Image: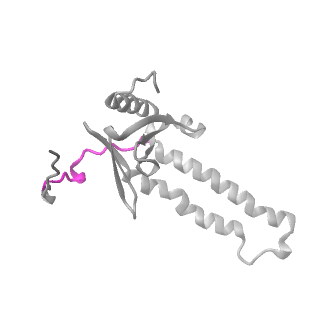
């Protein structure tokens, strides 16, 4: 007969006691590079009205000045957010934490995993990074994406998870 016994709250594992693995050391720099590219595009776009129309119709506070002011926290944010990310691989699941103000901890049990893949962008490849995407049987709400892993670590994790769920690498 099926039984689902209660567990006392004090018996639940504490995520603070886990040995969290940090993201790759160059992940923050990679994010800053991406944000710098976005900022430069915004800066170039904000200069277009001045070039086309001229300074006669320019607003009192130039748009490019606002872009520069907003760029400082935009470019600094990865230095704050990346150290607060981490992952733990346990015997039966993988756990990922993220967030500065709104923190989240996501655990994906290996018995729910349907598919695992790694991916990377040209910018990721320049920094030696990859993303690990884990698809679960529960649909998109149960999926887990871990960005900022070293390319070798992401591939080792992919192979490990596939081995845990019993899917051969040739099938994937």
Question: Does residue 93 show up?
Answer: yes
**What is the x, y in percent for residue 159?**
39, 28
Q: In which quarter of the image is residue 171?
A: top left
Above or below, comparing residue 171 to residue 11 in the picture: above
Seen as rendered, the residue at the extreme bottom is: 60
**What is the x, y in percent for residue 19?**
25, 44
Q: Which residue is drawn at 58% across and 49% down?
A: 34
Above or below, comparing residue 9 to residue 87 in the picture: below
Quadrant in which the N terminus is drawn: top left
User: Is 19 positioned to the left or the right of 55 in the image?
Assistant: left
Q: Give the range drawn in magenta.
A: 11-25
Question: Does residue 89 show up?
Answer: no
User: Which secondary structure is most common in the magenta stretch?
Assistant: loop
Q: Quadrant of residue 68?
A: bottom right
**What is the x, y in percent for residue 22?**
36, 44
Q: Residue at x 85, y 75 (%)?
A: 56
Q: Nearer the viewer, residue 83 or 141?
A: 141
Seen as rendered, the residue at the extreme top is: 170
Report how many numbered discs are placed on residues in the image: 0
Q: Which colour scheme is used?
A: one colour
Q: Which of 63 and 108 is in front in this view?
A: 108
134 falls in the magenta region: no
Q: Nearer the viewer, residue 12 or 22?
A: 12
Q: Which residue is drawn at 55% across and 62% down?
A: 72
Q: Which of 7 and 22 is in front in this view?
A: 7
14 falls in the magenta region: yes
Q: Which residue is drawn at 47% across and 48% down?
A: 28
Above or below, comparing residue 170 to residue 128 in the picture: above
């Amino acid at each position: 007969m099926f039984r689902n016994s209660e567990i006392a709250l004090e018996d639940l594992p504490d995520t603070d006691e886990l040995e969290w693995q940090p993201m790759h050391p160059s992940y923050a720099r990679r994010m800053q590079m991406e944000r710098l590219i976005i900022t430069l595009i915004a800066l170039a776009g904000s200069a277009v009205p001045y070039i086309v129309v001229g300074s006669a119709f320019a607003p009192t506070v130039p748009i490019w000045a606002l872009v520069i002011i907003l760029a400082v926290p935009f470019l600094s944010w990865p230095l704050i957010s990346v150290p607060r990310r981490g992952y733990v691989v346990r015997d039966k699941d993988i756990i990922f934490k993220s967030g500065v103000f709104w923190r989240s901890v996501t655990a994906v049990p290996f018995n729910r995993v349907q598919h695992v893949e790694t991916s990377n962008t040209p910018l990721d490849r320049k920094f030696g990074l990859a993303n690990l995407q884990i698809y679960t049987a529960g649909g998109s709400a149960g999926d887990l994406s871990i960005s900022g892993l070293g390319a070798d670590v992401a591939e080792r994790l992919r192979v490990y998870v596939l081995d845990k769920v019993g899917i051969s690498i040739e099938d994937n």
